[in-house]
Amino acid sequence: MTATKVPEQLAEVPVVVRTGADERRATIIGVILMVLAAIVLGVFAFGVPSDATSTFNLSLPGDVIQDVSVSFNSRVFSGVSAVVIFALGLERLRRRNLRWTNPALGIGLLLFVLAFLAWASADSSFSMVGMLRSTVISSIVITLGALCGLTCERAGVINIGIEGQLLTSAFVAVILSSAFGTLAGVGGALIVGALLGALLAWLAIRFQVDQIIAGVVINILAVGLTSFLASRVLSQAQDLNAPKRVPGFRIPLLADIPVIGPMFFDHTFFVYITFLLVIGLHFALFRTRWGLRARSVGEHPKAADTLGIDVLKVRYRNVIMGGLIAGFGGAFLALAQISRFEENMTGGIGFIGLAAMIFGRWMPFGALAAGLVFGFSGALAQKVAILGTGIPSEFMLMLPYVATVIVVAGLVGTARPPAADGQPYVKQ
Amino acid sequence: MSETEVQKAEQPQPPERPSWFETATGVAESTGRALILPTLALITALILGAFIIALSDIDNLRRLGTEPGAALGGMLEEVLTAYRALFRGAVGSINAISETLFATTPLLLAGLGIALGFRAGLFNIGAQGQMLIGGIVATYVGIHLDAPGIIHIPLTLLAGLAGGFVWGGLAGLLKARTGAHEVITTIMGNFIALYLVQWLLTTPGLQEAGRNNPVSEPLAPTAHLPRLFGSEYRVTIGFLVAIVGVFLLHWLLFRSSVGFEFRAIGANPQAGSYAGMNVAILVTLAMAIAGGFAGVAGVNQVMGLAPFKASPALAASVGFDAITVALLGRSNPVGVLWAAILFGALTAGGRVMQGAAQIPLDLVVVLQALIVIFVAAPGMIRAIWRVKAAEEETPQLTTGWGS
């Protein structure tokens, strides 16, 4: 749209202005919080008997420290939560301390979810740590997809093809792992991810095909090719669709810590590498010469070119690196999470990754946080289906997508993409 | 398209006064040169497809080491059998042509909507969701309305149009009011629509009695689309609806003032805004109309084929395939028609190929993707075939997420 553009030379100076938009946002979020408080009080607090007890289990069967759990009165907990959420909402409506709008929303939503779980598990126990653990597991592919996207977009190339990269590399990982072992599977997935990245870069840079079109076509190609080969080859050679599940590795001592141990330190190597990747990518983007160059190419390629940076080379490199990350994600999906190939097995997770990239504002730690939030809503959907609360699980499954629409609509503040995102660069 | 129009297009015209048809379609400019690129793209895709068939032929691959001659012959035989079946299934008989048009119908309708979006500078990836919402709204009308066919059919179609219109319009409204990029909102909208429809199909009033899975009651017989060439052939009057859509979109884009404004904001929103156009309303309207087209495509998938029930899979992958149709048709209503017929023919042929030669239908998806890659990157085709194909511009829509 015709948004007013800040003149280039002024853009450097951070101007703190109390804008009307921020005040309006505070009002909207204030109202939302009060509605949430009303639901918590009316449904979650008074929807259970006054003496109902909720129990959150904080240990898993195999843990060293057993039987850690928290029990509390469901109605009291929800009542207190409602009061706190209401107070947060009231504070927002006074339109002060505008920087605290998002944290207030975050705390409000957290209390809302806890009150919801207390209501859903009233008079029974609920494996909190089990859900948190599956949150971490399902966040990995989302986070990797988001990291792939931001590696490309920080250099100015939009990658809508994450879904296709994940799917194709998962396919290759399954076949190579079944035939030659895990290492070959992971290696093949990385190579295929990088190749698809190279194809995207080639179309976008060499032929200047619209980047979204290129990404969409890569997705269609990936679905078609993997489904074709799956029903023509894998159906005849079942032994190629039986990869060995990658064993987990408990990190000694750390894995024995209650709650945190099973959540973070009892997984396959994919999970640990993903966490290291988040830290490494953050460091690389903001503390190294590579990162500075990539970001400058994504923000202002002409200036970068003037300073002697090879814009196109940086873009090729970043998009191929993004492909490697997506390939790793595909390998995790195929070898650790699902352990076989099914047609269209990614089922839109690449797009959730894209959403997580935006939700996380093109930052690696943001991508991880968004991945965990989206992973949590997926885990919650499963739990809700099991608990039988009468809430259709479809609405839980919708959450990541609705959240993303809300984010891009600016309710949680405007997320600014790299300035030259999606624009081909032609050397003058 | 009538005879006279075709003749008109073929007659050499003085360049200063092209007829309405020529200005609209650009046919007069260089019919031959404009067709070189898509034709070569199709041929290249088919050649690559042949390699894909041959290289996934496990039995022959296994004996390649021991008896290479026979193995290579076997592979060639496999490719030829497949492509013969593809051709036969696409145009080999009246039934094949009926099947082609049957597959063309939803692709054409949804493709027209996406083409309209492209013209207005909007990348609508949400045809899939718009089809689902249109389909589900229409299903409700199709089940519960009690009226003779002459009223029931148009009303059910309109219900689908309305559903898609609202769902597409929402994405447009979000863009107009908040600047949320339509690529993101429509992708997310696809998933939201999918889960919404999945849930709606389990609610009473829609779900078929005695079912656990999300499938609707069958539509009332008065809401079934009549077949076009008699009961033996599956193509319905839905195809005629789609053809009407071609003329409608053509009129809208090139003959109406709002269409001019769509194209103006598509070319340059700032300029449109300075010229006094209400960009916000235009963006919303363009997305809404695009959604309306897709919505009708969705209804067609319920009203047009047995067992006349809605399911979450009613859109299959038409919403995405329609993107390739709009791209291949260069966002031109008549171009979209030809592109939809081509991809419809590939789909119909692909089904026969799957039955006769055991080549999975997914090969057609691969061919479509390859064709669009080659058309979007004409430099590749020029390099491969060493020809000077007409210089075509690929649409450059992406201006970053923020805009």
Image: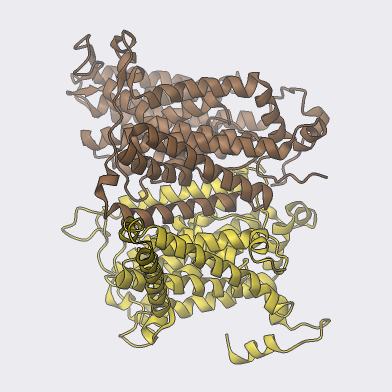
Coloration of the structure image: by chain
User: Residue A292's image quarter?
Assistant: top right
Position of residue B230 measured from the top left corner of the image (x, y, whole percent): 34, 88
State which chain is coloured yellow.
B
Left or right: residue B16 compared with residue B255: right
**Can I make out residue B367 in this image?**
yes
Q: Nearer the viewer, residue B26 or A305?
A: A305
The residue under the point 29% across, 45% down is A241
The residue under the point 34% across, 53% down is A230
Position of residue B251 measured from the top left corner of the image (x, y, whole percent): 64, 75
Position of residue A404 measured from the top left corner of the image (x, y, whole percent): 49, 38
Above or below residue A158? Residue B283 is: below
Q: Nearer the viewer, residue B18 or A181?
A: A181
User: Residue B247's image quarter?
Assistant: bottom right
The shade of chain A is brown
User: Residue A392's image quarter?
Assistant: top left
The residue under the point 15% across, 58% down is B210
Above or below residue B303? Residue A327 is: above
Position of residue A186 measured from the top left corner of the image (x, y, whole percent): 41, 34
Above or below residue A305? Residue A160 is: below
**Can I make out residue B176 in this image?**
no
Left or right: residue A90 compared with residue B53: right
Q: Quadrant of the C terminus of chain A?
A: top right
Left or right: residue B327 compared with residue B94: right
Tell how many labels: 0
